[in-house]
Amino acid sequence: MVNINVKDICFSYSSTKILENVSVDFDSSSFVSIVGPNGAGKSTLLKCMNKILVPNSGDIHLDECNLQKMERMEVARNLAYVPQNSKRVFPTTVFETVLMGRRPHLGWFNSKNDTEKVWQVLEEMGLEDLALRNFDELSGGQQQKILIARALAQDTGVILLDEPTSDLDIWHQLDVMENVKKLVKKRNVTALMVVHDLNLASKYSDRILMLKDGKIVAAGDPSSVMTIDNIANVYGVEAHVHTLFDIPYVMPLKQIGAALNV
């Protein structure tokens, strides 16, 4: 289990501010959704946390370790990253693709233990029947699950997922969310997910982080974050928020402001 502390993170592209003094603690063994309009800094925050991008200022700690002082492979042994677009080319089988997740532990050479871990992950995700299929031949939903399986094979305490449900139909969206939720509980990992669908975030998250213009507007459980005022302030949309089985559901009604960060 890994605790993550983000302290006063700022990031800019040239003169354009993307993140401004973002501070947040992520507890271990939780499912956190990061929401907000386009351009709010959601994906940038994940990339700073994975050392893909280097903040202009501020610190990120994994337990007691400063992320910026960690070697790339050490970061990969602690954080797994599922990229935004699953439609990528891997001229490999599903088994070989998932096996890539073992590289941070033993380099390019795999052992019997690595092979066993890959089979364990494939079975856990219900993907063993696809093991010998070529990754490139599969549907977007199947590819997304395989990339999650590759992240699980890294055997880390934290998984970062950047819009894993984008471009998926509703069945595959629910499938991905159900799998991530189960894995958080079963493996005691922390999952941080960028997601646009507010109702998916409400249904599956333990906690929601809402961003606007590179700043945190709200953070907490779904009921405290998914409010009429927050949605109006962050998205410029008037909405009703209904509660069903203690879960808030957002019904957008109309725009009340100009488009935000298109």
Image: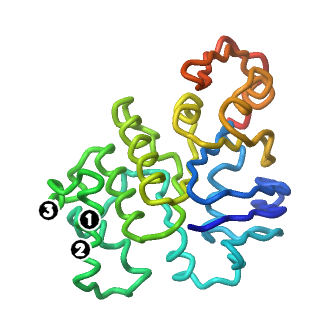
Which numbered disc, 2 or 3, marks the residue closer to the eye? Answer: 2
Where does the image place residue 244, in percent across and percent down from the top left? 56, 18
**Which residue in the protein does label 3 denote?**
132
Instruction: Identify the residue at horizontal 52%, vertical 67% (top origin).
Output: 157
Q: Residues within 10 Å of mark 3 (few under 14, many from 20)?
A: few
Marks 1,2: beta carbons within 8 A: yes
In the depicted structure, whether residue 199 falls above or below residue 135: above
Where does the image place residue 74, in percent across and percent down from the top left? 55, 82
- Quadrant in which residue 246 is drawn: top right
Image mark for residue 169: none
Residue type pointed to by label 3: Leu
Instruction: Identify the residue at horizontal 80%, vertical 23% (top origin).
Output: 229
**Which residue in the protein does label 2 denote?**
116
Marks 3 and 1, Cα distance to the nearest angstrom?
A: 15 Å
Q: 21 left or right of 139?
A: right
Which numbered disc, 3 or 1, marks the residue closer to the eye? Answer: 1
Secondary element type, mark 3? loop
Marks 1 and 2, Cα distance to the nearest angstrom?
A: 6 Å
Residue type pointed to by label 2: Glu
Mark toward the start of the polypeptide (3 vs 1): 1
Mark toward the start of the polypeptide (2 vs 3): 2
Residue type pointed to by label 1: Gln
- Quadrant in which residue 65 is drawn: bottom right
Where does the image place residue 213, in percent across and percent down from the top left? 79, 43
**Which residue in the protein does label 1 denote?**
120
- Quadrant in which residue 7 is drawn: bottom right
Marks 2,3: beta carbons within 8 A: no
